[in-house]
């Protein structure tokens, strides 16, 4: 049977007429399916992707928060240890404050393209382990943001089959309010010596908020960590043109201790906490000196990177392309293993996550936990975290890593905090970010 083209056009017009109606009906189901499978956390999905850094352009220790329409941009960089060229694409997705895709369409939050190829890459130079270095800066001439809010940045390998290789969170702020923070000793007596409490006031003299209790929420992060961030905090009190977040024992974080460090910037003139550097046919092997638990030690103040790391080498002139990779061995001295606990290397170098590759094994002969990490030359902060041994009970909450059992916790410790203010007026389809501030606990 031959179907006339006029009939086809007529049916297409009918389908086009009903398409908006069908999309309205199907949108909740499509959005729910999208959110269930949505990768909403910072994560590296491929083992050959290393040394991922994401920060404000030029500020290597900053959390990626930029102003809408401002001059600041965010920069993503990473190494591909396969040392070849791959067809990497990036994609940005607007999210609500709970890091699920918002109801906005791509045309509503981006001017240009939400997806584009990463074109800036270079090969390593005179390194034992060859790698390819990629960089991306946003916004750029292809991608410009038109809405404030949470964003996910995804990088895909589209060389053969589209594969997600890494995901990163960042925030775009449309500053309409100011934030005045204070860092206090915890009001709870049991936490007085070990924790830090955050109070703050949100001033909105030039920005009208109809129903602050329902429309405003705050998130507080310590050292750029989302794993222990306090979210969905509503104002405690409302005053004329001001919202007070003045809780007792609510916005509270363990102070922790200043982070341990590994100075890997030179394999020729090594720092005092490195035991040995060995060059092999496959690369470098660096053994650190033994660490010991610090929970019972008094607080000692020294400068650290608040758990972050910087890529740098003093052996070669180019930090990005001439820095070497090394297998770095960590030792934690302990007469006997922690009962019912696993020990992990933890910090920015692990994406603030408990990952199997950073699990420490107890060696009875050495009387220590031993772990290993493949790291690029640089300066790294790190800590040791404990986690209860996994059980078959999947009904309970996911266990959280603890730094206090090995490292201890003191209220004097210097930490970096970030406050984000979310605003969603009645009838809106997305969460705006109308204010942010980053500050040190040593205000």
Image (spheres, grey):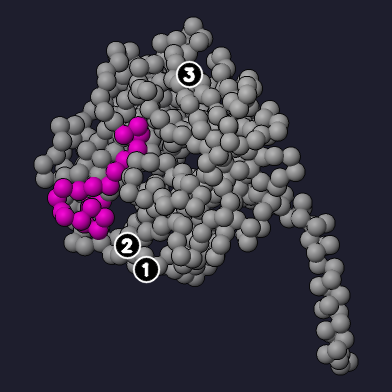
- Which residue is label 2 attached to? 132
Residue 173 vertical placement versus 126 (above, below): above
- Mark 1 and mark 2 in contact? Answer it, CB < 8 Å: yes
220 or 242: nearer the viewer: 242
299 or 343: nearer the viewer: 299
In the rendered view, does 273 fall on the left or right side of 30? left
Residue 334 placement: quadrant = top left
In the rendered view, does 221 fall on the left or right side of 239? left
User: Which residue: 35% across, 32% down?
Assistant: 306
53 or 291: nearer the viewer: 53
Residue 393 seen in this snapshot: no
Of the two numbered discs 3 and 2 in the rendering, the one whose residue sits closer to the viewer: 3
Q: Position of residue 51 (x, y in %)?
A: 34, 49
**Would you call the spot at circle 1 few (<14 residues within 10 Å), some (14-19), or many (20 or more)?**
some
Of the two numbered discs 3 and 1 in the rendering, the one whose residue sits closer to the viewer: 3
Label 2: state its secondary structure: strand
Question: Alpha-carbon distance for marks 1 and 2?
Answer: 7 Å
Residues rendered magenta in the picture: 305-326
Q: Which residue of the protein is positioned furthest toward the left in this rendering?
A: 269
Residue 385 placement: quadrant = top left
- Which residue is label 1 attached to? 85
Q: Residue 320 magenta-drawn?
A: yes
Residue 414 placement: quadrant = top left
């Amino acid at each position: 049977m031959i179907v006339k083209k006029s009939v086809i056009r007529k049916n297409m017009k009918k389908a086009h007429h009903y398409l908006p109606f069908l999309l309205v009906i199907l949108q909740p189901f499509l959005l729910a399916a999208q959110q269930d499978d949505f990768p909403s956390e910072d994560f590296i999905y491929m083992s050959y992707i290393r040394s991922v850094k994401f920060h404000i352009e030029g500020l290597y220790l900053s959390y990626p928060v930029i102003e809408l329409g401002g001059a600041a941009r965010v920069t993503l960089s990473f190494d591909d240890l396969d040392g070849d060229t791959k067809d990497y694409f990036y994609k940005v997705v607007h999210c609500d404050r709970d890091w699920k895709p918002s109801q906005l369409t791509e045309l509503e939050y981006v001017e240009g393209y939400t997806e584009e190829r990463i074109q800036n890459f270079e090969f390593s130079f005179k390194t034992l382990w060859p790698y390819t270095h990629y960089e991306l800066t946003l916004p750029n001439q292809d991608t410009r943001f038109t809405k404030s809010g949470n964003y996910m940045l995804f990088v895909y390998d589209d060389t053969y089959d589209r594969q997600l290789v890494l995901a990163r969170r960042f925030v775009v702020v449309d500053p309409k309010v100011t934030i005045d923070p204070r860092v206090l000793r915890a009001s709870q007596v049991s936490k007085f010596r070990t924790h830090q409490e955050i109070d703050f006031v949100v001033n909105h003299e030039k920005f009208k908020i109809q129903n602050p209790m329902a429309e405003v929420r705050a998130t507080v992060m310590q050292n750029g960590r989302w794993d222990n961030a306090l979210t969905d905090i509503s104002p405690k009190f409302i005053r004329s043109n001001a919202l007070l977040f003045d809780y007792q024992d609510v916005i509270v974080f363990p102070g922790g201790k200043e982070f341990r460090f590994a100075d890997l910037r030179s394999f020729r003139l090594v720092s005092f906490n490195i035991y040995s550097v060995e060059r092999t046919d496959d690369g470098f092997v660096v053994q650190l000196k033994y660490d010991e638990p610090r929970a019972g030690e008094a607080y000692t103040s020294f400068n650290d990177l608040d758990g972050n790391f910087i890529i740098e080498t003093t052996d070669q002139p180019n930090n990005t392309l001439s820095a070497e990779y090394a297998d770095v061995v960590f030792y934690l001295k302990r007469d006997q293993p922690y009962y019912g606990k696993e020990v992990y290397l933890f910090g920015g170098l692990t994406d603030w996550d408990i990952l199997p590759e950073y699990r420490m094994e107890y060696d009875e002969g050495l009387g220590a936990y031993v772990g290993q990490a493949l790291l690029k030359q640089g300066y790294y902060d790190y800590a040791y975290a404990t986690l209860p041994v996994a059980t078959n009970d999947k009904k309970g909450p996911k266990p959280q890593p603890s730094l206090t059992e090995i490292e201890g916790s003191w209220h004097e410790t210097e930490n970096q905090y970030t406050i984000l203010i979310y605003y969603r007026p009645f009838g809106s389809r997305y969460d705006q970010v109308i204010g942010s501030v980053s500050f040190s606990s040593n205000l």
